[in-house]
Structure formats: C-alpha cells, structure tokens
Image: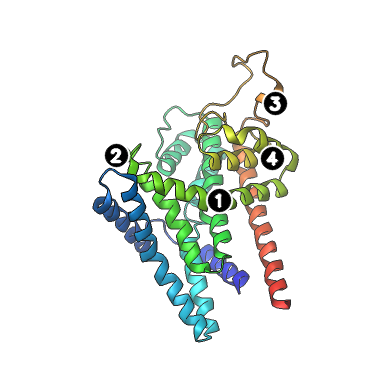
Amino acid sequence: MTFLSILCALLIEQLKPLRADNPIYAEIKSLALRMETWFNAGHANHGRMGWFLMMGMLMVPAAGVHWVLRYYNLTLGVFVWNVLIVYLTLGFRHYSHYFTSIQLALSAGDEAQARVLLAEWTRLDTVGMETTEISRIAVEKALITTHRNVFGVFFWFLMPLGPACAVMYRVAEYLARAWNEPEHMRNEAFGQFAARAFYWIDWIPVRLTAVAFAVVGNFEDAIYAWRNFAHRWQDEAIGIILTAGGGAMGVRLGTPAETAARVLVTPDMAVDESDSEGDVLPGDEPGTRALQSTVGLVWRALLLWMLLLLLMSGAMFLG
C-alpha cells in the first residue's frame, strides 16, 4: 500500500500540481508565525516549547485519522488518507516550473529572463550574473529542493506512523528555515532548537539521497567529492547533497567553504602550490547542459527510490 500511495500521489501531482501558496501551506505558515509571536522571549527553551506544540497540533490529527481507519479495517480509507498526506507533503512540482523556465531561457540565450526567474525563485540578487553562475545556483537549488520536498518525505513516510512522520519532516524543515533565515530571526536563540531538530531528523534521509545520486550517476566521483569536501560546508547536509550530486553529474557546484557555494574554483585563482589536487573540487564548471543533467539525475534517483519501495512492498506482501 505504501508504494501505491506514493505512486498515486506522484501521478496526481503531475496532473494537478499543488501550488506553493495553497491555503493549507498558508495556514501552517500563519501558525508558525503565531507560535513565534507567542513563545519567542529570547530563550532557546521557548523555541523548543513552540516546536513541540506545533508538531503536536499537526502530527496528532494525521496519526489519529490513520489509526482510526486502520482500527476499523477501512483499507480504502487508509489508502486515500495516505495518498492525500503524501500529495500534500510532496513538492516535486512546486518549483519545477522555475527550473524548466530557466533552462529554456538559457537555451534560447535569454540571460536576462533567466536572471529574473532565478531571482524570483531564490530571492537572491542576480544582477550581472552570467550563464555559469545562473546554471550553478539553479542546479544547487534544484538538488536541495528535490531532497527536502521528495526524498526526505519518502523516507519518513516509510516509518510506522507514515502520514504523521511525513508531516513532521516537512514542518520541521519549514520551521528550521522560518525561525532562523529571516533577517529578524538570524542568530536568535529561539530558532536554535528547530535547526538542530531538523538536522537530526534529516541526518539519515540526506545520506540516502546522496547514495541515490551516486548510484544513478558517476559513483566514484560522487563518493570522492562527498568524503573529501562535504564536511567543509557550513551546513553539512547541503554539503553532502551538493558534493554527491555534483560529483554524480561531473560538475563543480562551488567551493566547500560556504553554506551555498558562491564562487567557483577556477584555474586563474591563486592556489597554494603546497595544495594537492585533492583540495580542488572535481568536475567541470556548470553550464546549460548541467541543467539537463540535473533533470536526468533527479528522475533516475526517483526511479531508484520507487524500485526500492516496490521491492520492499513485494517482500512485505509475500511475507
């Protein structure tokens, strides 16, 4: 049933993508803002209280409905509920239109349009960006978004409290951003617990995503980049995804000294002669072709996940 639930949710999303500004997401964002307003008194403990309360308010109903349906042996009801939750928590098509539009703009040589689309998607200042930088940031954003909106949800949906765990993952990811990234929330103690909680919630999924990228791409380069460079990123999870994804595609997604790499390592940069080749990220500079490679990598990784889910479901059915 797990495999069929995810498959149906993916098919429905392909036909009817859920908008990123839909009413359900808007209510969750509003609730997160109210929690921050009610609990934020400048201490980390207040952030912990707000986090657990919000999780309880969203996870308990999801788990309760699932339990009631299973208790009364309403198989069809369980299936429909699973599909609904996966559909609401997945985000495979939420932002794909940005990525596709950027790819088409660059292919047509319209860098100005590509900059506008990238600015809308990432909220970054894209003025003066060239094709290489536009492509790199788009690829980075696509890999990270795909992991957090798709593969991370898959992992937690497989847990015993499937629907509730999927909700937990997506809400934890949102709180880690909403309570830390805005200008007025940066370096505040209130968001520390949310960031740390999501780090541990995402610890296994992010590594499974990296393994999937390696398996369906250039395995040797992906593992090499992961092992030697991922730990140098300020955000370890982002480092793992970008190094494994970039290595799998044979592209260099930036320097490992920054949270989301901004500067490419190029031959004309000064490099200490004492540094070995192992200190330089492997791969070529990303370009328009890297966008095509990203689409292929993501779809192959998705098919790998679905194949594993099918095998697991078959083993459970036969068992």
Three-letter amino acid code at the position of disc 2 = His
Kind of element beneath mark 3: helix
Q: Earlier in the sequence, mark 3 or mark 1?
A: 1
Left or right for 21, reference 165: left
Instruction: Specify whether residue 109 is in view.
Output: no
Mark 4 vs mark 2, CA separation in Å: 37 Å
Residue 192 location, quadrant? top left
Number of numbered discs? 4
Q: Residues within 10 Å of mark 2 (few under 14, many from 20)?
A: few
Is the residue under label 2 in contact with that under label 4 (CB below 8 Å)?
no
Q: Which marked residue is nearer to the observer: mark 1 or mark 2?
A: 2
Residue labelled with disc 3: 278
Q: Residues within 10 Å of mark 1 (few under 14, many from 20)?
A: many
Q: Which comes sooner in the sequence, label 2 or label 3?
A: 2
Tell whether label 3 touches label 2 (CB within 8 Å): no
Tag 2, which secondary structure?
A: loop
Number of residues whose C-alpha sits closer than 10 Å to that of mark 3, classed few (under 14), some (14–19) or many (20 or more): few
Q: Which disc, if any, is residue 222? A: 4
| Disc 3 to disc 4, C-alpha distance | 14 Å
Q: What numbered label is drawn on residue 184?
A: 2
Cα distance, mark 1 to mark 2?
27 Å
Mark 1: amino acid? His
- Judging from the image, what secondary structure is the residue with disc 1 in? helix
Image quadrant in which the C terminus is located: bottom right
Q: Earlier in the sequence, mark 4 or mark 2?
A: 2
Task: Give the structural element (helix, strand or loop) at label 4.
Answer: helix
Q: Quadrant of the N terminus?
A: bottom right
